[in-house]
Image (cartoon, rainbow, N blue to C red):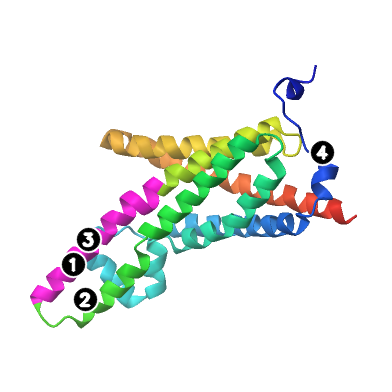
């Protein structure tokens, strides 16, 4: 007996997917996934080339010198990527829901929770405003107040916008990719790339907070996570586009 029949799973065939009414979503999801791949390269360049300031006054100086560079420090490319992920994740839900609808509902919900958390706690534009206010301050007391607020924004970004949301979306990537392993639509390479992305990302966050001695390992795992995420989004984008093309043939 087919294992899918044992588990009560009704797989969607490639023909059913391609000829569904969601072809437009598959096309949009494929395009946004490929754009995300380009943005991931940009993120790697940003984090590899830009020095990491430690204090609010250093960040304020960057914002005052070049506001775009300041926003890049606070993951502007990540903000754009998360927005672009929305149609991609929705397209994946429509493709994979017949394989495991319960898991896909939870994974999709988790992803949107992660996005919401990131946007709610990302302090990029707050820092831009504070830098302008700091530059216009006329007294030392005012400058000290803006510096304190700026340091709080930095901490909030590092601990909430990046880490909390990153763990949540990494869990979503892992769940979605696990469903891919049970489907007949995506390759095992795609599925394993997503699983590696999610598990290494979560492990990196844990190791970063265990001890300073494990920070180097955490950084290495972050690199593995972003490279495997690049592979995942490119393969996902390519496959979604193939489904769209099949449907139009």
Decide which of tag 4 and tag 2 comes sooner along the chain.
4
Could you tell me which secondary element the residue under label 3 belongs to?
A: helix
Query: Above or below — where is 5 with respect to 235?
Result: above
Please provide the residue range marked out in magenta: 140-164
Residue 222 image position (x, y, % from top left): 44, 43
Could you tell me which secondary element the residue under label 2 belongs to?
A: helix
In the picture, the quarter occupied by the C terminus is: bottom right
Q: Residue at x 28, y 58 (%)?
A: 154
Which label number is shown at residue 134?
2
Residue 146 occupies which quadrant of the picture?
bottom left
Query: Above or below — where is 2 with respect to 225?
Result: above
**Nearer to us: label 4 or label 2:** 4
Asked whether, in this view, residue 114 is left or right of residue 214, the answer is right
Q: Is residue 76 visible?
A: yes
Asked if labels 2 and 1 touch by Cβ distance under 8 angstroms, the answer is: yes
Decide which of tag 2 and tag 3 comes sooner along the chain.
2
Residue designated by label 1:
147
Asked if labels 3 and 2 touch by Cβ distance under 8 angstroms, the answer is: no
Give the spatial CA distance, label 4 vs label 3.
53 Å
**Nearer to us: label 4 or label 1:** 4
Observer-nearest of 108 and 28: 108
Which label number is shown at residue 151?
3
Asked if labels 3 and 4 touch by Cβ distance under 8 angstroms, the answer is: no
Q: Is residue 224 visible?
A: no
Residue 210 occupies which quadrant of the picture?
top left
Decide which of tag 1 and tag 2 comes sooner along the chain.
2
Q: Residue at x 40, y 38 (%)?
A: 204
Asked if labels 1 and 3 touch by Cβ distance under 8 angstroms, the answer is: yes
């Amino acid at each position: 007996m087919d294992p899918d029949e044992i588990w009560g799973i009704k797989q969607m065939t490639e023909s059913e997917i391609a000829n569904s009414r969601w072809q437009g979503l598959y096309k949009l999801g494929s395009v946004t996934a490929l754009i995300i791949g380009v943005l991931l390269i940009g993120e790697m360049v940003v984090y590899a080339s830009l020095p990491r300031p430690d204090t609010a006054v250093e960040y304020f100086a960057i914002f005052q010198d070049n506001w775009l560079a300041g926003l890049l420090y606070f993951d502007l490319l990540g903000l754009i990527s998360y927005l672009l992920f929305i149609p991609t994740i929705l397209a994946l839900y429509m493709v994979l829901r017949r394989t495991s609808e319960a898991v896909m509902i939870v994974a999709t919900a988790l992803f949107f929770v992660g996005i919401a958390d990131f946007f709610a706690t990302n302090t990029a534009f707050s820092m831009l405003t504070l830098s302008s206010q700091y530059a216009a301050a006329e007294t030392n007391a005012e400058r000290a107040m803006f510096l304190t607020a700026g340091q709080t924004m930095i901490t909030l970004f590092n601990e909430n916008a990046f880490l909390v949301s990153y763990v949540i979306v990494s869990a979503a990537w892992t769940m979605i990719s696990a469903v891919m392993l049970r489907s007949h639509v995506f390759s095992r390479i795609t599925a394993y790339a997503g699983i590696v992305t999610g598990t290494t990302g979560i492990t990196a966050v844990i190791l970063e907070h265990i001890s300073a001695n494990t920070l180097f390992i955490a950084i290495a795992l972050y690199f593995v996570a972003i490279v495997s995420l690049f592979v995942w989004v490119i393969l996902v984008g390519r496959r979604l586009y193939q489904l769209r093309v099949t449907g139009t043939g």
